[in-house]
């Protein structure tokens, strides 16, 4: 395209982003189903290079893997998946140009500019209007979608449900009794009382989120549920959903894992344990372990993978490990967190960990805190903890045999 024409299109995109008017691209030559899915509290990327940094946790990873799986399995009839996440205005403009291409199948990504710095999900409700506009723009840019999959009681799902209702798009909602089960647990423990509920709800928004789950489930064309020991009883008691009333509207599906990634990581770790050269991922882990004090090398690795956030309990895990007998028998490897530019939530956990074990003491006591790694690398490290690193870390079964 001539530079002049491309510039004119870019100016048009910028104007529509600012005004909220939707882009309307031609329906792509897609014969199968187009599915949209979203999580607006993460910077989702196809390579999962930022998995474990900031808010890019398990949901961000799951949506990448799920979208890839849907378009690769030709038996399910899905030709295109559009995964939406937050991003800058510049990123959003580029995505609109990409998504308006007439015949793009496969797993595509679109960023939504929330016009605000990232905030915790509990504080993001004022971004509903910007989220709704961004979702509508992306849906129209691809010429429409056949289905929107929602799974969180957050501002993204609230905004997407508004767009789905406006444009007549069916919604599939993955229902979990959250925060219902959290409220019940806090109530039983005595930490949440009638007198304290209002003060706590100002921060956690339990009441609004429970009502949002009920609304999304009632409006959905179909709901998906995770297996639980007393699923029907819990859904009826906690959420108010009677699974027996309309069983055709509900499907129970176990939450999936990417077996291909796990199988590759296990094969790689076993080969290295038997003498094959280390892959780049295992070589990097070996370099980290070599920095430990000599008396810490050869011990098994305890591994935790996740965001550095209080709900994940990383600092609590360090405290339990450091104060118990496992500290003498295994090194602790925490994978996750943006150490270069930590978010407020990450900084809170890092400060707590530093109070327990200062940075200068970590190698001496056996604490490895490398920050986040790409999803495939994290899987390789987890497999190495199971099968060991020759001369550096014992296999996981060694520790269990002595337990």
Image (cartoon, rainbow, N blue to C red):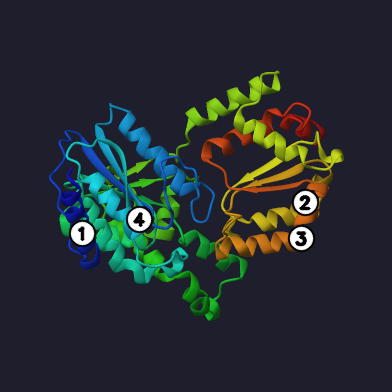
Q: Residues within 10 Å of mark 4 (few under 14, many from 20)?
A: some
Indicate which label's residue lies in the foreground, 3 or 4. 3
Q: Quadrant of residue 115?
A: bottom left
Q: On the image, numbered disc 2 is attached to which residue?
A: 362
Q: Residues within 10 Å of mark 2 (few under 14, many from 20)?
A: some
Q: Is residue 165 visible?
A: no
> Gap between marks 1 and 2, in whole Å?
52 Å
Indicate which label's residue lies in the foreground, 4 or 2. 2
Of callouts 3 and 1, which one flags the residue occurring earlier in the amino acid sequence?
A: 1
The answer to whether the residue labelled 4 contacts the one labelled 1, judged by CB atoms less than 8 Å apart, is no
Q: Which image quarter holds the N terminus?
A: top left
The answer to whether the residue labelled 1 contacts the one labelled 2, judged by CB atoms less than 8 Å apart, is no
> Gap between marks 2 and 3, in whole Å?
10 Å
> Gap between marks 4 and 1, in whole Å?
48 Å
Of callouts 4 and 1, which one flags the residue occurring earlier in the amino acid sequence?
A: 1
Indicate which label's residue lies in the foreground, 3 or 1. 1
Of residues 273 and 75, which is closer to you in this image? 273
Residue at image point 61% right, 27% down? 279
Indicate which label's residue lies in the foreground, 4 or 1. 1
> Gap between marks 3 and 4, in whole Å?
45 Å
Query: Would residue 302 appear left or right of 233 to someone viewing this image?
Result: right
Q: Quadrant of residue 269?
A: top right
Q: Is residue 208 visible?
A: yes
Of callouts 3 and 4, which one flags the residue occurring earlier in the amino acid sequence?
A: 4
Q: On the image, numbered disc 4 is attached to which residue?
A: 241
- Residue 106 at x, y = what percent? 29, 35
Q: Which image quarter holds the C terminus?
A: top right
Indicate which label's residue lies in the foreground, 2 or 3. 2
Q: Secondary structure at mark 1?
A: helix
Q: On the image, numbered disc 1 is attached to which residue?
A: 11
Q: Residues within 10 Å of mark 3 (few under 14, many from 20)?
A: some
Q: On the image, numbered disc 3 is attached to which residue?
A: 356
């Amino acid at each position: 395209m001539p530079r002049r024409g491309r510039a004119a299109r870019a100016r048009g995109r910028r104007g529509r982003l600012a005004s909220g008017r939707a882009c309307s691209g031609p329906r792509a030559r897609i014969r199968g189903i187009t599915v949209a899915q979203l999580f607006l509290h993460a910077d989702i990327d196809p390579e999962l290079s930022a998995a474990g940094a900031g808010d890019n946790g398990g949901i961000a990873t799951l949506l990448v893997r799920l979208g890839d799986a849907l378009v690769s399995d030709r038996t399910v009839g899905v030709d295109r998946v559009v995964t939406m996440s937050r991003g800058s205005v510049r990123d959003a403009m580029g995505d609109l140009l990409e998504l308006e291409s007439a015949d793009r199948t496969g797993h595509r990504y679109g960023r939504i500019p929330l016009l605000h710095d990232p905030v915790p999900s509990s504080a993001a409700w004022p971004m509903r209007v910007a989220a709704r506009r961004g979702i509508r723009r992306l849906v129209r840019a691809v010429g429409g979608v056949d289905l929107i999959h929602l799974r969180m009681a957050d501002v993204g799902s609230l905004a997407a449900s508004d767009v789905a209702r406006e444009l007549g798009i069916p919604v599939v909602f993955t229902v979990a009794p959250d925060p219902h089960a959290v409220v019940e647990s806090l109530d039983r423990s005595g930490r949440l009382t009638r007198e304290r509920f209002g003060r706590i709800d100002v921060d956690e928004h339990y009441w609004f989120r429970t009502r949002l789950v009920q609304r999304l489930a009632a409006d959905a064309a179909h709901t998906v549920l995770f297996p639980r020991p007393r699923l029907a009883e819990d859904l009826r008691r906690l959420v108010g959903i009677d699974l027996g009333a309309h069983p055709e509207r509900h499907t129970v599906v176990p939450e999936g894992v990417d077996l291909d990634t796990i199988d590759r990581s296990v094969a790689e770790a076993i080969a290295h344990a038997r003498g094959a050269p280390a892959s780049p991922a295992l070589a990097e882990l070996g370099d980290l372990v070599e920095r430990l004090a000599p008396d810490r090398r050869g011990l098994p690795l305890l591994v935790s993978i996740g965001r550095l956030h209080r709900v994940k309990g990383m600092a609590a895990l360090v405290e339990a490990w450091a104060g118990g007998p496992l500290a003498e028998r295994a090194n602790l490897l925490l994978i996750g967190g943006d150490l270069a530019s930590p978010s407020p939530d990450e900084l809170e956990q890092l400060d707590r960990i530093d109070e327990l074990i200062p940075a200068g003491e970590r190698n001496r006591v056996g604490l490895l805190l490398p920050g986040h790694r790409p999803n495939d690398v994290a899987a390789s490290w987890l497999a190495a903890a199971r099968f060991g690193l020759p001369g550096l870390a014992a296999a996981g079964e060694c520790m269990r045999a002595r337990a």
